[in-house]
Image (cartoon, rainbow, N blue to C red):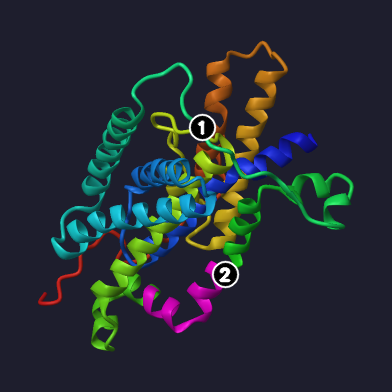
Amino acid sequence: MVGVLASGVRLAVPILLAALGEIFSERAGILNIGIEGEMLVGALAGFLGTFYTHHVGLGFLIGMGASGVFSLIMGFITITLKEDQVITGIILNILALGLTSFVYRALFGTSRTPPSIKPLTPLKIPALGDIPYLGTILFHQNPLVYLAFLLVPVSAWILFKTQFGLNLRAVGEHPRAADTLGVPVERMRYIAVMLGGIFSGLGGCFLTLAQLNRFTDNITAGRGFIAIAAVIFGKWNPYGVAVATLLFGIADGLQLRLQALGTRLPYQFLLMLPYLLTIVALIGIVGKSKPPAALAVPYQKDN
């Protein structure tokens, strides 16, 4: 059980990072379905950055930067051109899936031994890491795991305790009123979308640089969509989102452990288990969620 919980915490991290970014985006009124694609772009760019520079820190920066730039496509189409946000997100996901596979194959071709990089190693926190059970679960993890969970209270503080967060939420709830009070609606939405892209890129980098140490086609495997569901489950609050992503991560860790133990359950069912639990949680536990009032509604200043 300790191993399942420890792996669950680790597996929750890429989804948590993407979901935190999605909170900023949705709180500003932009439903960014494209975070799955942004994670993919971040995963590949981070891997390439580390592979060619031999520096994992630069890899993270390159991955986050690439994903942030990719998110600007979403921003331009939905904020400036005011096109449908859902359709735009779907198109960007398809684009990222094809683009990342194409770039990877153009650089490395197809090989039975794909290139890999040296992943981040777990960091045991002194004293805390020696606590029975809890130390193994929480304090003997990858450094990015600590960063991800530290970003939860930081994101909550930014959203609910700062003027920037107040303006961001105002833009997502009532953009016309915010505009009347002098809040630059489009600029705030661009910042929110880009923040979402950077967070998603960090989540993608986690997969390639801290978990699998290589890139494969569709390495995100729907984690971006789970992140969107986690935002609803968490009611657009970073703490609620952390709980939702931990639920998915632990379910994912459980199915991996059951497969390793050779259970008689069909492996297809085990692979489905985390997603099934997420759906059950969404329809049975969370109850009604109230999204930002202007979510997915383009803002036209002249209306």
Residue 280 seen? yes
Q: Which residues are magenta?
A: 154-168
Q: Which residue is mark 1?
A: 116
Q: Quick one: label 2, few (<14), some, or many (20+) residues within 10 Å?
A: few
269 to the left or right of 129? left
274 to the left or right of 191? right
Q: Nearer the viewer, residue 220 or 206?
A: 206
Regarding mark 1 in the picture, which secondary structure is present there?
loop
Q: Which residue is mark 2?
A: 154
Q: Nearer the viewer, residue 197 or 229?
A: 197
Q: Position of residue 125 (x, y in %)?
A: 78, 55
Q: Position of residue 35 (x, y in %)?
A: 37, 48
Q: Quick check: 256 above or below 296?
A: above
Question: Is residue 228 shown in magenta?
Answer: no
70 to the left or right of 132? left
Q: Quick one: label 1, few (<14), some, or many (20+) residues within 10 Å?
A: some
Q: In the image, which is nearer the foreground, mark 1 or mark 2?
A: 1
Q: Nearer the viewer, residue 114 or 282?
A: 114
Q: Position of residue 268 (x, y in %)?
A: 53, 17
As drawn, which residue projects farthest toward the bottom?
A: 181
User: For the C terminus, which image quadrant?
Assistant: bottom left
Alpha carbon separation for disc pair 1 and 2: 33 Å
As drawn, which residue projects farthest toward the left?
A: 302
Residue positioned 32% across, 36% down in the render: 100
- The quarter holding residue 94 reads top left
> Which amino acid lies under the numbered mark 2 shown in the image of this protein?
Val
